Amino acid sequence: MSNPVENDQYAVIGNPIAHSKSPAIHGRFAAQSGQRMEYQRLLAPLDGFALCVSAFRAGGGKGVNVTVPFKLEAFALATRLTPRAQVAGAVNTLKFDDENILGDNTDGIGLVSDIVRNAGVSLENKRILLLGAGGAARGVLLPVLSERPSELVIANRTVSKAQQLVELATAHKQGEVLISACEWSQLSGKFDVIINATSASLSDEVPPISGDLFAAHTLAYDMMYGAQMTSFLRFAQSQGAVLRDGLGMLVEQAAEAFYLWRGVRPETAAVLADMRHALE
Ligand code: ATR
């Protein structure tokens, strides 16, 4: 009699981790595509990320998602990196094989997929404003540039950090895109897409940008999401913009990780609709 096929093991590692939606999302993807896998939450001690990963891998784990505050440690732990993880300087997905720990960053491609495929807004030849210059902003640079916008302006409270991202983006630009850093007060003209990659919404603040930057067709995207609309989206709404929060990005980054691990591209629309419903 043959042994029953064991399920492949995956996990999300973070601290805190109790509220992670990743197990629910990956559980849906696995059920949908008939993949034999299990996905659990792992709480790593703040000084114990690498140990947590090696114990999971030694127990047969095939890969992990990595969340706050371990994305830089995951970057350091990876023995091979995808180009988008290299530019992001951070890793949210690890895939294990016998020799290597492959590190990827699916956050940026998740954002782009949500904008282009789910919201139906092309970034090609568009004027894009990126608010923020921390890890979240850096993570989306390469995927956004790959869509060939006409202009990318990066604005940040600490302007020197925006300038650093401009240098990084310029080193990886494709085609004739204009890339610049700008102070809040110097921003001008209308933007087609304004992406809030700051954490200002956490303290119910809004980056101090003018409402004049929004046109009626402007897509205002907040990487954050919650049961309530973020302060940035409330401001964008008052300017008549088209609104989108980061729940779709969460589902799409998970779909990219699932694809990396399993080679199967999950359907995301129904999963996103259910996640939205659960938030309400
Ligand atoms: P993350 O990994 O979420 O990007 P981070 O690397 O700490 O976190 O970056 C937070 C970003 O939000 C930074 O761009 C930060 O601006 P500074 O570089 O000037 O610190 C920005 N940010 C945080 N609170 C903000 C606020 N109240 N108004 C505007 N920008 C804010």
Image: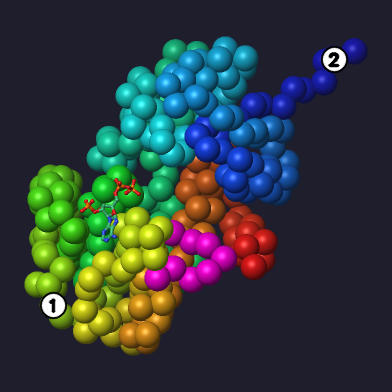
Q: How many marks?
A: 2
Query: Viewed as shown, does residue 179 lie left or right of 138?
Result: left
Badge 1 amino acid? Ser
Check if residue 210 falls in the magenta segment.
no
Residue 241: x percent and y percent?
37, 82
Query: Viewed as shown, does residue 138 lie left or right of 265?
Result: left
Q: Nearer the viewer, residue 155 or 111?
A: 155
Q: Main secondary structure of the magenta part?
A: loop
Q: Secondary structure at mark 1?
A: loop
Judge the density around disc 2: few (<14), some (14-19), many (≥20) Cα neighbours within 10 Å.
Answer: few
Judge the density around disc 1: few (<14), some (14-19), many (≥20) Cα neighbours within 10 Å.
Answer: few
Q: Which mark, by number, is residue 188?
A: 1
Tell me the residue at 59%/30% (across/down): 42
Q: Secondary structure at mark 2?
A: loop
Badge 2 amino acid? Ser
Quadrant (top left, top right, bottom left, bottom right) of the C terminus? bottom right
Q: Nearer the viewer, residue 185 or 21?
A: 185
Up-down: is 146 above or below 38?
A: below
Residue at label 2? 2
Check if residue 228 falls in the magenta segment.
yes
Residue 32: x percent and y percent?
71, 49
Residue 174: x percent and y percent?
18, 53
Q: State the extent of the magenta-drawn residues as a range.
A: 224-231
Up-down: is 38 above or below 6?
A: below
